[in-house]
Amino acid sequence: MTTVRGFFFPKTASGASSLVPSPPWRYSGDLLTVEYRTDPSRVRELLPEPLELADEDPGAVALIWADWQSCSESGRELLDPVLAQYKEAFAVVRCKYRGQTYTRCVYIWVDKDFAIARGLHQGYPKKLGSIHQTRPHPYGPAPRIEAGARFGATLAAADRRLAQAVVTLREPSETNGFVNAHPMAHHRWLPSVEKGKGLALDELIESGAASFEGGQPWRGDAELELFEAPTEELARLEIREPIAAYYRQVGVVWDGGRLLESGTSGAE
């Protein structure tokens, strides 16, 4: 009897072709975060039951650009960088579940297939996109991490630009913002292969970092624009009021989540 191996598809006799290795997954990244307020009703429409709006600042949104290097526990992917390096941009909001405040990713775009596969496992709604952001460097024309430094960031998908930002750093900060500062409340959904049978997988899960380290956060101001597109709805989270922008370098380990409940999301 043949045994096939691998954490994710494709599963083979050796398991070497699996799109992603088994957790833990380790990340090093540069994050640009832009926080603003939108109409809370636009946030509410993205929260399936049993999730509710956060009690405080229910219209707060964070749009985050991240330039990542990631790897499995062995770290071997770092020596084959095509397997480690990718970029993403994602929009998060806050929500409430049984009295606890959570962060929820409502839109996210990445530029590598392995990042999409990890997102399917973690409950992130990942799609393919084109993401770019200015990288700091201690020499030449690139910005240093200091007051007055300016960073640009762009997001596009399906040949349309969805967002662009310019962040100007002002001063060191005690935090990297508040919208993305909670455990994640995500759904893992998979339709049944039988027509009319609904969802074969319907889980509300809690997810977060198994460990975290980070450099000094910097706070600043942002010029942010969102653009309409035929197949994307990011612009519905329209900018009503800017809050702040942040830059931080981080290291994160992800090693699984926790089931909150199943079969109650009401998704179609």
Image (cartoon, rainbow, N blue to C red):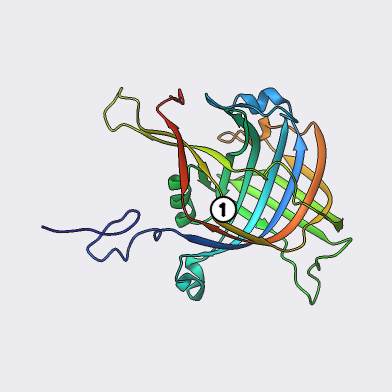
Q: Position of residue 150 (x, y in %)?
A: 82, 59
- Above or below — where is 28 with respect to 107? below
Quadrant of the frame with the C terminus: top left
> Relative to residue 214, is residue 81 drawn left or right?
left
Quadrant of the frame with the N terminus: bottom left
Residue at 78% over, 75% down: 138
Using the rendered view, name the quadrant where residue 7 is placed.
Answer: bottom left
Q: Position of residue 54 (x, y in %)?
A: 67, 29
Using the rendered view, name the quadrant where residue 37 is placed.
Answer: top right
Work out whether residue 97 or residue 64 is closer to the camera in this orientation and state it: 97
Label tally: 1
Residue at 45% over, 55% down: 113
Residue at 57% over, 44% down: 108
- Above or below — where is 135 with respect to 170? below
- Above or below — where is 56 with respect to 248? above
Q: Position of residue 176 (x, y in %)?
A: 74, 51
Work out whether residue 71 or residue 221 is closer to the camera in this orientation and state it: 71
> Relative to residue 176, is residue 148 drawn left or right?
right
**What residue sits right under mark 1 in the picture?**
209
Q: Amino acid at mark 1?
A: Ala
> Relative to residue 128, is residue 29 drawn left or right?
right
- Above or below — where is 208 with respect to 48? below
Residue at the outermost left position: 1
Work out whether residue 63 or residue 218 is closer to the camera in this orientation and state it: 218
Secondary structure type for disc 1: loop
Residue at 67% over, 34% down: 235
Sort mark 1 into few (<14), some (14-19) or many (20+) by Cα contacts within 10 Å.
some
Q: Position of residue 94 (x, y in %)?
A: 66, 35
